Amino acid sequence: MDIKAIQAEIRQLLEERHAILLVHNYQRPEIQDIADITGDSLGLSMEASKTDAEVIVFCGVHFMAETASILCPDKVVLLPVLSAGCPMADMITPESLLEKKAELPGVPVVSYVNSTASVKAESDICCTSANAVQVVNSLTDNDTILMTPDKNLARYAQRYTDKRIIYWEGFCPYHDALTADQVRKVKRDHPQAQFLAHPECRPEVIDLADEVKSTSGMLEYVRTSHNTEFIIGTEIGIIHTLKVQNPDKTFIPADESMVCADMKKIRLPHIVNSLLTLSPVVTVEEQTRIQAKRAVERMLKVPRD
């Protein structure tokens, strides 16, 4: 496969289709290298809503393309590999959430943006890994909160609030698999390195972190840090971005096996085919879209620290 030739073909097709290529930080390096914008899921969708592009090619997973469709209903949203999903998002359904809400009348639901549109639609407000604490604390009329679907993000938020957080038993299989023993081993091997952990990691891993950051938070922290060596406790795809942005710094994966299989499904030929055929298209039913958008917009109104 002539990577350079296919990359050039994609850029030409994007121009012809009046399209924008959004690429998540966990995607393959050769896809990140030709993105119009790289970033986290919500940030990418928000950027897309500001452009005049007619077509959005979203290189990520299904719930991310849904979020783009929620915020950009007037645009065609393409997900080059429709089967690229998220195991954590699949750990909750709107039906199971409705059952839980019936058990907890009056308890507001905070749902991580790493969830399906139908789950967002049954939630009171969304959060990201970067603003989960602020969102929880913004619910000043409630002492108890239900957080879905990531138990580790909820347990992280619990550290910084007096509210009682009831959490869903969901998790990211890749972040949750990172153990404290593995982190200790890498820290011993690299004693000068700072350990950056994602909030989706287990509590005992969070305890070992020098900093706990979302993907966008890690990128910003490393850019401004005087430290030159970092252990990265998230999906290893972000290391490509970190190296490109910080060529004078060293990055060590906390665990080489932190590779999201779904994030790696999309390859360059899939993007070519998607642009040629304008498919597969991801859409959200209008009533679901309106309700889900309300939960996202409520989050966006929460002041940042």
Image (cartoon, rainbow, N blue to C red):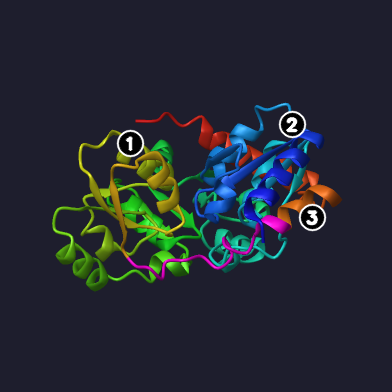
Q: Position of residue 188 (x, y in %)?
A: 15, 66
Q: Please indicate, yes or no, whether residue 229 appears anywhere in the rendered image.
A: yes
The answer to whether mark 2 and mark 1 are in CB contact below 8 A is: no
Asked whether 148 or 281 is in front, the reply is 281
The answer to whether mark 2 and mark 3 are in CB contact below 8 A is: no
Residue stretch rendered in magenta on the structure: 255-269
Per the image, the residue denoted by label 3 is 273
Asked whether 31 or 138 is in front, the reply is 31
Q: Earlier in the sequence, mark 1 or mark 3?
A: 1
Mark drawn on residue 223? 1
Quadrant location, the C terminus: top left
Q: Amino acid at mark 1?
A: Arg
Left or right: where does residue 136 sit relative to residue 89? left
Q: Residue at x 35, y 50 (%)?
A: 157
Q: Amino acid at mark 2?
A: Ala
Asked whether 118 or 247 is in front, the reply is 247
Quadrant location, the N terminus: bottom right
Asked whether 125 or 205 is in front, the reply is 205
